[in-house]
Image (cartoon, rainbow, N blue to C red):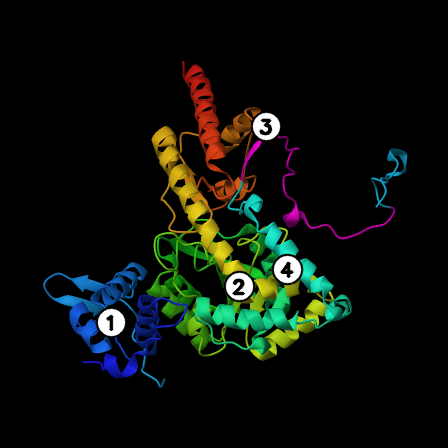
């Protein structure tokens, strides 16, 4: 029997709950091979006694581990490490321009990029309800707290230093705050040398694409389907995109392995926490498999963890980067989803040498970020303001998710197929094959509903999902009810027209 008592250390005055500390350490033992697949675990009472904790702590930990797929309970036999996990060898611990002066056509030639063209949105008025693809509600942003901290910073004598040229890596105080914040909340093991501050996650994706994929014949693996903006970024770099299936366990890592055996793979892009667009979570088994493949075949994993903080049913699974022992994972995140889209502060976490090269490239794109805002965010992280705001909106978004899904199922269940997402800000909704999204969206516009225009990407690509992402977080409860009511009318109109065509 594995000596849990001698190997598990629980810190009672930590910000992280005891049961989550226990989860983290058991997961670590499983990942390191110290607890191989099918290993029997001690009963909750016995383990609680050996660790001197309440039995409920162990029960909660076991329930969390079961929900994440690390362990399983076999009736009449006990609790075991999941048998399907891969075996790991153990190791040690301006002014307006006059209309007649506007030039519409250039007097010179330039490069155009057809893959970046997107359908322009029509003008949104106050009557229009926008169903986006999963954005935060900017009306909930802690603007008073941000303004207060910002004002206090500018009152201090040394604030002028923040107005001059600063490090391309980003504000040092913010990087220090992120070290503590990310190590505690994501289980990372980083220093300031592993962090580059970016203007949001998209800059991180762009820097990765240029450094990893801009040379000839570079290949990146993505899910089918995948986050469209990331795909366009990789195409812009000149990369060849290889798609692999995505199911209810996330990216098909067996398919990635097959690709690795026949061609050189340079990178894999994953939104592991909630796959974009389908919202599924990459399973524990596939996480371990992907890390093993990255080490064996020497490719980079670009982990875009865009909404890690929004998980409603249980604690979020720690990112791939938390178990990256070989420097294969580049972790991207930011504060756009937590606070508001206008807060363009993100981060790129990677080995020191890669971060250094990314900083050099960033210098010729955007010399540095908004140092005053970065300093403001650093203080808000250190004082706990960011975490308190996150906890507040998490409850609000969960209520909105529950209401949106309930009404969608009740009022429009005959037209839509969807699973209630465990986290994130959107639902992956597939339309009944008898209907066409083009028709639905056009009719919706007539009733002042703007559906996410990126639906074309998922309706017309090779996967034939016939699905879109419907965001719920940016709509309050009154707006959600109004959206569903209008959509009911949309489908009534579409159905009437369809019946007339048949008769």
Where in the figure is residue 350, as x and y percent of width and height?
55, 73
Question: Disc 3 and disc 4: Cα gap in Å?
Answer: 35 Å
The residue that mark 1 highlights is 53
How packed mark 1 is, by other alpha carbons closer than 10 Å (few <14, some 14-19, many 20 or more), is: some
The residue that mark 4 highlights is 149
Q: Is residue 208 left or right of residue 367?
A: left
Q: Nearer the viewer, residue 264 or 479?
A: 479
> In this picture, is 90 found above or below 167?
below
Q: Nearer the viewer, residue 415 or 310?
A: 310
Q: Which residue is painted at 45% across and 26% down in the image?
A: 485
Q: Earlier in the sequence, mark 3 or mark 4?
A: 3
Q: Write down the region rendered in magenta.
A: 107-131
Where in the figure is residue 107, as x and y percent of width and height?
88, 46
Q: Which residue is painted at 32% across and 69% down in the image?
A: 18
Q: Earlier in the sequence, mark 2 or mark 4?
A: 4
Q: Earlier in the sequence, mark 2 or mark 1?
A: 1
How packed mark 2 is, by other alpha carbons closer than 10 Å (few <14, some 14-19, many 20 or more), is: many
Element under label 1?
Answer: loop
Point out the frontmost of discs 2 and 4.
4
The residue that mark 2 highlights is 220
Q: Does the magenta stretch mainly form a helix, a strand or a loop?
A: loop
């Amino acid at each position: 029997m594995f000596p849990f008592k001698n190997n598990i250390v629980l810190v009672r005055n930590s910000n992280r709950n005891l049961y989550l500390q226990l989860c983290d350490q058991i997961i670590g033992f499983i990942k390191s091979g110290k607890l191989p697949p099918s290993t029997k675990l001690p009963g909750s009472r016995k383990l609680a006694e050996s660790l001197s904790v309440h039995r409920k702590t162990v029960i909660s930990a076991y329930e969390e581990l079961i929900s994440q797929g690390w362990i399983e309970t076999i009736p009449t036999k006990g609790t075991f490490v999941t048998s399907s996990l891969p075996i790991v060898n153990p190791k040690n611990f301006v002014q307006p321009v006059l209309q007649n002066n506007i030039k519409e056509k250039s007097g010179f030639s330039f490069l155009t990029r057809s893959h970046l063209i997107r359908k322009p949105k029509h003008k949104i008025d106050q009557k229009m309800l926008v169903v986006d693809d999963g954005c935060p509600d900017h009306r909930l942003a802690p603007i008073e707290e941000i303004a207060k901290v910002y004002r206090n910073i500018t009152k201090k004598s040394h604030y002028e230093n923040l107005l001059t040229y600063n490090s391309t890596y980003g504000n040092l105080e913010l990087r220090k705050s992120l070290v503590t914040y990310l190590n505690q909340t994501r289980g990372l093991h980083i220093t300031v040398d592993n962090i580059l501050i970016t203007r949001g996650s998209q800059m991180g994706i762009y820097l990765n694409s240029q450094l990893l994929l801009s040379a000839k014949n570079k290949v990146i693996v993505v899910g089918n389907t995948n986050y469209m903006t990331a795909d366009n970024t990789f195409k812009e770099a000149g990369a060849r995109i290889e798609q692999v299936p995505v199911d209810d366990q996330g990216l098909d890592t067996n398919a990635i392995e097959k690709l690795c055996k026949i061609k050189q793979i340079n990178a894999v892009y994953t939104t592991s926490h909630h796959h974009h667009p389908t919202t599924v979570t990459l399973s524990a088994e596939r996480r371990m498999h992907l890390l093993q493949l990255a080490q064996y075949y020497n490719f980079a994993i670009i982990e875009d963890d865009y909404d890690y903080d929004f998980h409603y049913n249980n604690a979020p699974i720690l990112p791939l980067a938390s178990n990256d022992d070989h420097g294969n994972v580049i972790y991207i995140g930011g504060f756009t989803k937590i606070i508001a889209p206008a807060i363009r502060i993100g981060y790129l976490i990677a080995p020191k040498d890669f971060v250094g090269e990314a900083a050099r490239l960033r210098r010729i794109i955007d010399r540095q970020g908004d140092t005053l805002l970065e300093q403001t965010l650093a203080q808000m992280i250190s004082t706990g303001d960011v975490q308190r705001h996150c906890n507040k909106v998490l409850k609000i978004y969960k209520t909105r998710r529950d209401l949106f899904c309930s009404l969608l199922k009740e009022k429009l269940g005959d037209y839509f197929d969807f699973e209630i997402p465990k986290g994130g800000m959107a639902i992956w909704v597939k339309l009944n094959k008898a209907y066409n999204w083009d028709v639905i969206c056009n009719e919706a516009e007539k009733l002042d509903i703007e559906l996410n225009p990126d639906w074309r990407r998922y309706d017309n690509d090779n996967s034939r999902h016939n699905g879109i992402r419907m965001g719920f977080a940016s709509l309050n409860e009154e707006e959600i009810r109004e959206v569903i009511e209008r959509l009911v009318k949309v489908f009534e109109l579409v159905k009437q027209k369809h019946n007339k065509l048949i008769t």
